[in-house]
Image: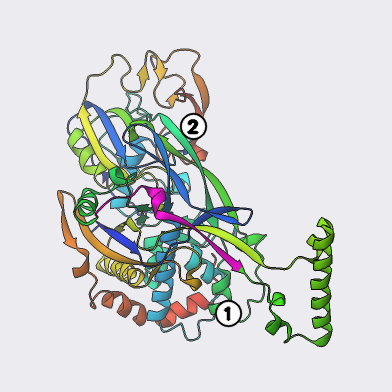
Amino acid sequence: MMQTTQWQMILRASDPIAHSQGTIGNKSLIMTKKIGMPDGTIEEVPYITGDALRHGLRETAAYATLHAADMLDDPQLDRGALRFLFNGGTITGKGDSSTFKVDKYRELVALFPPLALFGGCTDARALPGQLDVWEGNLVCLETMHLLPQWVADWAKANLRETQPAWELVEEVQRVRMDPELLPEKVKLLTEADQIIVHNKAAAMEVARSNDDAIAIKENKSGMLPRTHERFLQGSLFCWGVTGRTYTDLELDAFSYIMACYLANMKVGAMSRSGHGRMQVVEGRRIHQEPLGSNFDALDTQLTAGIGSLYRSHVQARKDDLRQWLTSTVNS
Amino acid sequence: MANEHREQLGVVAESIDPLHVTATLYEGIVAGISGGGAPFLDSILTAVVAIRERLVPPSDPRETLPIEIPIAQSECGRVYLCSSGLLHVQSHDLRHKHKRAPCTEYARIGAAKITRVDQSAAEDKSYRVPYNYELVHNNTVEWWCFGDRELILEMLRDVHALGKFRGSGKGRIREWQVEICEPWGDGFPVLRNGEPMRPLPLDYPGLKEGAFIAYHTLRPPYYMRMLEEPCAMPRRL
């Protein structure tokens, strides 16, 4: 039976979040969007794109499935399989898109249930997914009217003050150091290279004293200071996922993927240098039924039992899954 | 799941009333579908039936199945009696869709035979496609139709977002409203003062001369360009 399940949650940034839309020179700008305010004006506020969050879920689904099939030790995946798992694949132009092989689709969904949830391109056809992933909206003054009522109530009850969006963004500077400027690193070079480095430093001194712009440019070091905007550590976001499932297996897969993602959630860039971790503060799971909805607290749903059906399903088909993912996948 | 032959798909209207349907959005919408504008109400309801029956979206006219929806049809049976979606764009935002080859994964868990990834051509080509994200006045999209209020409202409960890129949070719906309304007169809801309120056949009764003509499909699935024909089109707002 078809059922729609929606997860809504408040996330806290355990680390600063670096999520950029582009750069100007060596300044990286935070991702922003326009939102309509209740008074009819338009404001530009920073946010996390639904694409980034959806990709995080897709990647989690791929690794969780490979793990359940004992494939992570020696995956040896085909190119098409990798594209299919990690970016939804592409229409290759090979094959006949005018004839849709329903049996093949059923077979693929049985082998890899996230295909139904996330959609993807396979066998010359783009198949829609069943998950609608929300954008990560900052909990701030400007977005208060866009948040679900329980989130607005929670903010009112738990926050001493709701900040304007741009108070939750900071600009920081990082420097990529040039090792040739550090004497102890220069000593590691060959003798010939040490001479080149010393000559370059001497030429720079002369250029500076002569105020010779061309020579300064030619001899300048590779040190790169750059700045980036990021969300403050501790910022709160409202996020949700709406999923349509048709079987117990799909619902279990959806819940398991959500649990895996939320257990180790990372968003945005610079995750290797202390950015991107997020954690759930409060959440709701909502079952939407034809004549009403019922609500559960999120924490009661992410128990150890989640995913057992999904994992045993994948485990039972792991040989077929390995064979498919290591063969030539048309995606 | 399969597009197999069934006796009847969908639901038939039990009562017909003039209706005003309103979708209130949380934020913006990517509405650049079918030559611009909001999605058609008849296509939304057809999609609900397809989703409930788990049909695969057809890519060829041969794959389409007759689907019943609780909206009345014109006497000629060529169009549903519902207007195009009406929205007033308040502000645009140019955004981009990115797709990148999974290079790290190629190196980490790909087969040993993968030695080179060409990101400038073929399947691994990276792309950055612009699209227009629109904020609409009052966050509302409106339609007018002749249909069964209760059945339409029940079906719209399964529609949580409108437009393109719903999967990544665009076009989220806060609320649906379906109200019985007063028709504006002859031609309701597909003609107003002789002007088309949706794509109509050129010989549609009551159509004023001089309407803007363009190729369009008359019935869902509207994206199927093979079914396009010359139509009298509503004016863009």
Q: Secondary structure at mark 2?
A: strand
Estimate the x, y position of residue B126 in percent, counting from the top left: 60, 59
Q: Secondary structure at mark 1?
A: loop
Question: Looking at numbered disc 1 in the image, what kind of residue is underneath it?
Answer: Ala
Which color scheme is applied? rainbow
Residue found at x 32% / y 42%: B26
* Left or right of residue A84: residue B118: right
Estimate the x, y position of residue A65 in percent, counting from the top left: 40, 75
Quadrant showing the N terminus of chain A: bottom left
* Left or right of residue A90: residue B56: left
Q: Quadrant of residue A110?
A: bottom left
Q: Residues within 10 Å of mark 2 (few under 14, many from 20)?
A: many
Looking at the rendered image, the disc whose residue lies closer to the viewer, 2 or 1, is: 1
Find residue A62 and name its label: none
Is residue B5 visible in the rendered image? The answer is yes
Quadrant showing the C terminus of chain A: bottom right
Among the two numbered marks 2 and 1 on one chain, the one whose residue lies closer to the N terminus: 1
| Magenta residues (range) | A160-175
Number of numbered discs visible in the structure rendering: 2
The residue nearer to you, when weighing A2 against A260, is A260
Question: Looking at numbered disc 2 in the image, what kind of residue is underneath it?
Answer: His
Residue found at x 57% / y 74%: B106
Estimate the x, y position of residue A235 in percent, counting from the top left: 35, 59
Q: Quadrant of residue B79?
A: top left
**Residue labelled with disc 1:** B111
Check chain identity for marks 2 and 1: say if they share one: yes
Find residue B216 and name its label: 2
Distance, label 2 to label 1, CA atoms, is 46 Å
In reply to whether residue A172 is colored magenta, the answer given is yes
Residue found at x 40% / y 67%: A15
